[in-house]
Amino acid sequence: MTYNTYIKIIAECNFSRSLVSYKQIVKFANVSPATVNEMTRHLQQQGLVNRYRYTGVVITKKGKQLAKKLLYNYRLCEVFLAQQLKIPLVEIPVQAWKMSDTLEIVTVSALEKFLEYPQRSPFGGNMKTDLLNDETIIRLNQLPERATAVLVSYLETPSLVKYMNHINLSIDDFIYVKFHDSDLNLIYLETSDHIEMVINSETAEYLYVRQETKI
């Protein structure tokens, strides 16, 4: 796994939070804690992250600059695979990253023009604003009870894409938080179509919403 991949993982997990835990990186990189420790130490030596003992890492200004470039190219490839090749959504994240990791500037420019400068990825990621710090967006598990929000985006992992397809929750859907069950770690929701669903709070941490005034 390349260092760029670790920066991508950290940047994605960094969205709407300041510190990314080592546990999160281990989970999404699917490697051992020792490997994550070694990789994050290297990233710190490169000035891309700051490491904090026992807790996690914070991406630096230099790291954010690299991450924005990587994520933009990645989402550009996601759009191409979804719109032009009609690849199933669940297969797009892995293939898009393999494509984007080697893109040259001239190819990025040509792809932008060919796709007519897309604004959002198939998973809702905004490609024109600050990719790492949109203060209008919060995590679903931060949304209080009896609040209404619109689903803006979610973390592009194959497992989460499958899950979103399974529960039939899509980008731009309105949702209403009925109840937080802290004992079972569950959030009870209702959509604008009056469909009720239950989501694990840990999963809701990677669903990003913008709070609205009404459904």
Image: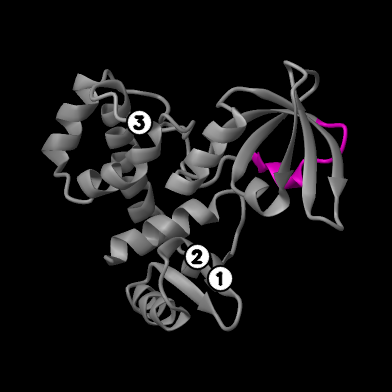
Which stretch is magenta? 138-147
Q: Earlier in the sequence, mark 1 or mark 3?
A: 1
User: Where on the picture, by quarter, is residue 83?
Assistant: top left
Can residue 157 be seen here? The reply is no
User: Where on the picture, by quarter, is residue 145?
Assistant: top right
Q: Amino acid at mark 2?
A: Lys
Residue at the spot of label 2: 27
Q: Determine whether 146 is above or below 204 in the image.
A: above
> In the rendering, which numbered label is found on residue 184?
none
Residue 110 position within the rendered picture, expressed as x and y whole percent measured from the top left:
15, 28
Q: Does the residue at mark 2 contact the one at mark 3 (Cβ under 8 Å)?
A: no
Q: Does the residue at mark 2 contact the one at mark 1 (Cβ under 8 Å)?
A: yes
Q: Name the side, left or right, on which 98 lies relative to 10.
A: left
Q: Earlier in the sequence, mark 2 or mark 3?
A: 2
Mark 2–mark 1 distance (CA, rounded to whole Å) = 6 Å
> In the rendering, which numbered label is found on residue 88?
3
The foreground one among 44 and 114 is 114
Residue at the spot of label 1: 23
Label 3 crowd bin: few (<14), some (14–19), many (20+), radius 10 Å: few
Q: Secondary structure at mark 3?
A: loop
**Can residue 47 be found in the magenta stretch?**
no
Can residue 118 be seen here? The reply is yes
Q: Secondary structure at mark 1?
A: helix
Q: Secondary structure at mark 2?
A: helix
Residue 133 position within the rendered picture, expressed as x and y whole percent measured from the top left:
54, 45
**Residue plotted at (26% across, 28% down):** 80
Residue 66 position within the rendered picture, expressed as x and y whole percent measured from the top left:
33, 55
Q: Name the side, left or right, on which 44 lies relative to 83.
A: right
Observer-side mark, 1 or 3, equals: 3
Q: Amino acid at mark 1?
A: Lys
